[in-house]
Image: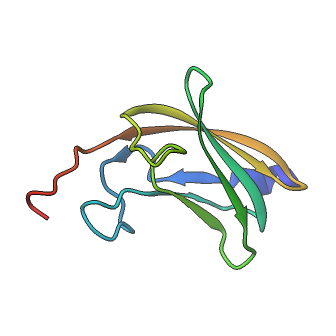
Amino acid sequence: DASVYMDRIHAVPNPYYAYAAYEQNRLDSRIRIVGLPAKATISIYSLDGILIRRIPKDNAAVAYAEWDVRNDKGLPISSGMYLIHVQAEGLGEKVIKWFGAMRPVDITNY
C-alpha cells in the first residue's frame, strides 16, 4: 500500500537546532529527508509559498536525500518553519512541516 510507504518519509532532525549528527564540521549544515523511494523530487517552500530549493533524488542505493539548508542560490536560509513537499514517483506526495533554528556562521573558532 502506497500510503504506508509514504508514512515512512520524514525530515531529520526535525526540529533542527543548528546541529545534525552527520555534519562534517562547523560550516556544514544539513538535514536528511529519509524513507524515500528510488525516485522522488523534494521541493522546499517558505510558508508564504516561495520555492526555496528543489532536490531531485534518483538513486535506488540510498533511501534519503540531503539538503544543505541553503536556497537555490547557495545562501543559508533563515530560521523558521518550512514546508517540504515530496513527490514520490508512482506512490504519491507528502508535505512535511519542518522547523530550523539556524546558527550564525562562526569562522573564528573553527
Toward the viewer: 58 or 83? 58
Residue occupying image coordinates x 62% and y 65%:
64
Q: Indicate the quadrant containing the N terminus: top left, top right, bottom left or bottom right.
A: bottom right
Residue occupying image coordinates x 37% and y 34%:
78
| Residue placed furthest toward the left | 109
Q: Is residue 1 above or below residue 50?
A: below
Residue occupying image coordinates x 52% and y 34%:
82
> On the rendered structure, is 36 left or right of 91?
left
| Residue placed furthest toward the front | 73
Q: Indicate the quadrant containing the C terminus: top left, top right, bottom left or bottom right.
A: bottom left
Q: How is the image coloured?
A: rainbow
Toward the viewer: 20 or 71? 71
Toward the viewer: 76 or 92? 76
Q: Position of residue 67 (x, y in %)?
A: 52, 55
Q: Is residue 81 above or below residue 20?
A: above
Q: Is residue 33 above or below residue 104?
A: below
Q: Position of residue 105 (x, y in %)?
A: 22, 49
Q: Position of residue 50 (x, y in %)?
A: 60, 27
Q: How many marks?
A: 0
Q: Is residue 46 above or below residue 105?
A: above
> On the rendered structure, is 28 left or right of 90?
left
Q: Position of residue 40 (x, y in %)?
A: 76, 57
Quarter location, residue 2: bottom right
